[in-house]
Amino acid sequence: MRKGVIPASVADTIVNLAFGDLDIDRIAQISHEKQHSLLGLIQEMQLIAGPEAGEYVHFGATTQDIVDTGLVLQVADHYERYEALLTTLRKRLAYAQTPYMARSHNVHAVPITFGFVLARYLDEIQRHVDRLTQMKADTLTGVFAGAVGSHSALGMAGIAVEEALMAELHLQTETVAWHNAPDRLVAYTGELAMLGATLAKIGRQFYNEASTENQQLAEPFVGQVGSSTMPHKRNPENFEAIAALAEPIFAAQTQLMHALLSVNERDAIAWKQLWLALPEIHQYVDRQLTSLIAMLDGLVVNVDKMQENVARLGDLVYAEDIMMFLADRLGKQTAHEILFEVAQRSIDQQTDFLTDLMANAAVAKVTSLSELKTVASFEKTTVAIPTLIAHVLEKEVG
């Protein structure tokens, strides 16, 4: 209307009437009969707008213009979800000093804190959100370019209409039509898939921590039934679901990659991959986000169990600290060899590690049991963690 392509009175009629009470059943019937994804809606809007205004419905556009731009508008809504998760994770950093047993190869490594675990995840998710934010403007690019993207129906007026329309929708205007090149969206969903992977990783770790043997974390209990046959069960089903969604997210991203294989100017085989997989990947990641936020809000943290697990292997978990302490007196490699031999024997024989270590003549010459006990401390091995957590928070602010 503002660009003089259709009469102003007609535009007002379409805006005021054509989006009124749509007969969904009739739209579905026409779409089925005509085997066209948008024709049912076009004809329904035409009917409601009336004989004159109806002739200007879908004027100069092509179906892919409407559907692709609609998809982009839906993508825009998803950006609001990310900050909620980051805010919830920040609140949980109250556990910054809670002792927690780090694992490598799924067995005890060295003590850390639960707050450090959360800070690490916060930093990782923040990187995803930063990248998603950086690509937001480019991702949110609409299209209104006609049959093959060349504005063949409206000519130069089509370019003006497209620019005005995208400005009104708060979308970026393309340089040339992306009917056959949805790389912006596929790049965006690639990052979204990586976010989903991180959320799944958190779900998997929390799932493991909720096991009967670990009991370090638990989902908030609100009366959910864990089993139809075992009344005692409290299953970590939300953690399971968050983790399980990684697979369909990866599958959806793989399908979206096929949308890049478009032939010629428009190719329904390729672009319909967007119709199928773009909503799916958003639904899966949105479920992960919603579930994890709810779980973090009510997360049951068993601090006593975390401390118990840190103490499970006794002073063995401070072997690295002792090695570095002895490095100045024996040499690092020599210290490692001695500690390895003593540690393995202590594990097999279930004896006291520090006592066994002091039985080694080379160690006894350069230190004492009391000095080793001072070295083998939670405070010493975690001394850098508060600074690392502060770095994460400072980076966010920066």
Image: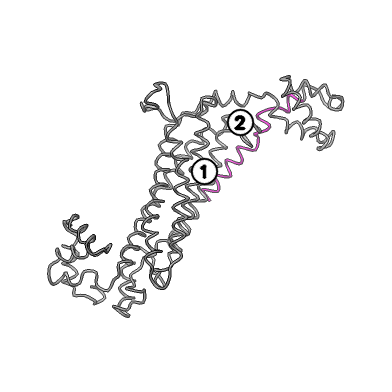
At mark 2, the secondary structure is: strand
Q: Amino acid at mark 1?
A: Leu
At mark 1, the secondary structure is: helix
Q: Position of residue 221 (x, y in %)?
A: 40, 27
Labels 2, 1: front one: 2
Residue 325 part of the magenta-drawn span: no
Which is more toward the observer, 95 or 348? Answer: 348
Place residue 235 in its image quadrant: top left
Is residue 334 placed above or below 133 in the rendered structure? above
Circle 1 is placed at which residue position? 122
The residue depicted at 73 percent of the width and 23 percent of the height is 348
Q: Which residues are magenta?
A: 372-398
Which is more toward the observer, 279 or 391? Answer: 279
Which is more toward the observer, 146 or 113? Answer: 146
Left or right of 103 in this view: 181? left
Instruction: Indicate which disc residue 101 carries.
Output: 2
Query: Extreme bottom residue here?
Result: 156
Locate the N terminus and report the quarter of the image it occupies: bottom left
Is residue 343 placed above or below 9 in the rendered structure? above
Q: Amino acid at mark 2?
A: Met
Place residue 169 in its image quadrant: bottom left
Of pointers 2 and 1, the one earlier in the residue sequence: 2
Q: Position of residue 79 (x, y in %)?
A: 40, 52
Q: Position of residue 305 (x, y in %)?
A: 55, 24
Q: Position of residue 50 (x, y in %)?
A: 12, 67
Is residue 171 placed above or below 120 in the rendered structure? below
Left or right of 64 in this view: 352? right
Scheme by which the image is coloured? one colour
